[in-house]
Image (tube, rainbow, N blue to C red):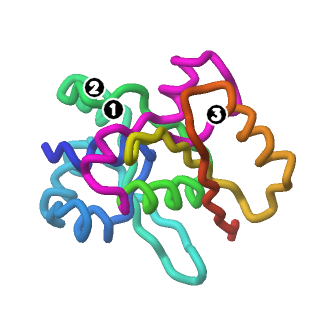
Amino acid sequence: MNQKLFESISRTRVITQKDAIEVIGVTMEELESYQQQKILSLKSIEVKKEVVKYYELSERGEKIVKENFDTIGQFYRGFDVLQDLTLSQFYLKLSEDVRATWETKDDLIVEYRLTGTVDGVFQENGKWRGVKVLNTSANSQTAERYMKFVEETKLDDVMFLMYQSN
């Protein structure tokens, strides 16, 4: 089983087929095998008039990942595919060393017992940085709520990634 693939999906909920192949280095045959074993589910969404194929873990996949990879804490539980794709693409641009420090918003909820968390945190150059994906329609009060979370936690700063709904 490809640990990098399953860590990525566990930490961001989704990965595009293209990123799984080009960034992670998984073959199409491996992806098809994971689908046949009902570990991954292949889905698609239209983004800017282009169909994007992406994978999510199935329930069976989550169970298998939990049993096989102790590097994964809480699974990221997103609800908006476009938001999750934005997070996934950001995550995959980080170096592997930085990705290894990633904690999901669900890890943060468990750790701090606070709601309104950022989507993920990672350590880079000795600093803990948060990342929050927001819809372009979000207002300044929304950003302020996440800045308050930063003040109450170990984070040194937060980055906001913007996406636009279809």
Quarter of the image for the N terminus: give it: top left
The Cα atoms of the two marked residues, 1 and 3, are separated by: 23 Å
Disc 1 marks a residue whose amino acid type is Glu
Q: Residues within 10 Å of mark 1 (few under 14, many from 20)?
A: some
Disc 2 marks a residue whose amino acid type is Lys
> Secondary structure beneath disc 2?
helix
Residue 15 vertical placement versus 163 (above, below): above
Q: Check residue 117 in the rendering and tell me which mark sits there, or answer none.
A: 3
Q: Residue at x 78, y 38 (%)?
A: 145
Q: Residue at x 55, y 43 (%)?
A: 130
Return the residue at label 2. Answer: 66
Q: Are marks 1 and 2 in contact (CB under 8 Å)?
A: yes
Q: Residue at x 56, y 35 (%)?
A: 155
Horizontal and vertical percent for residue 31? 21, 57
The Cα atoms of the two marked residues, 1 and 2, are separated by: 6 Å
Name which of mark 3 and mark 2 comes first in the sequence. 2
Relative placement, left or right, of 1 versus 132 is: left
Number of the front mark, 3 or 2: 3
> Secondary structure beneath disc 1?
helix
Horizontal and vertical percent for residue 71? 26, 30
Relative placement, left or right, of 33 versus 109 is: left
Residue 25 vertical placement versus 148 (above, below): below
Relative placement, left or right, of 118 versus 38 is: right
Horizontal and vertical percent for residue 33? 16, 53
In the rendered image, residue 124 lying in the magenta stretch gets the answer: no
Q: Residues within 10 Å of mark 3 (few under 14, many from 20)?
A: many
Number of the front mark, 1 or 3: 3
Disc 3 marks a residue whose amino acid type is Thr
Name the residue at the front extreme: 126
Relative placement, left or right, of 41 versus 36 is: right
Return the residue at label 1. Answer: 62
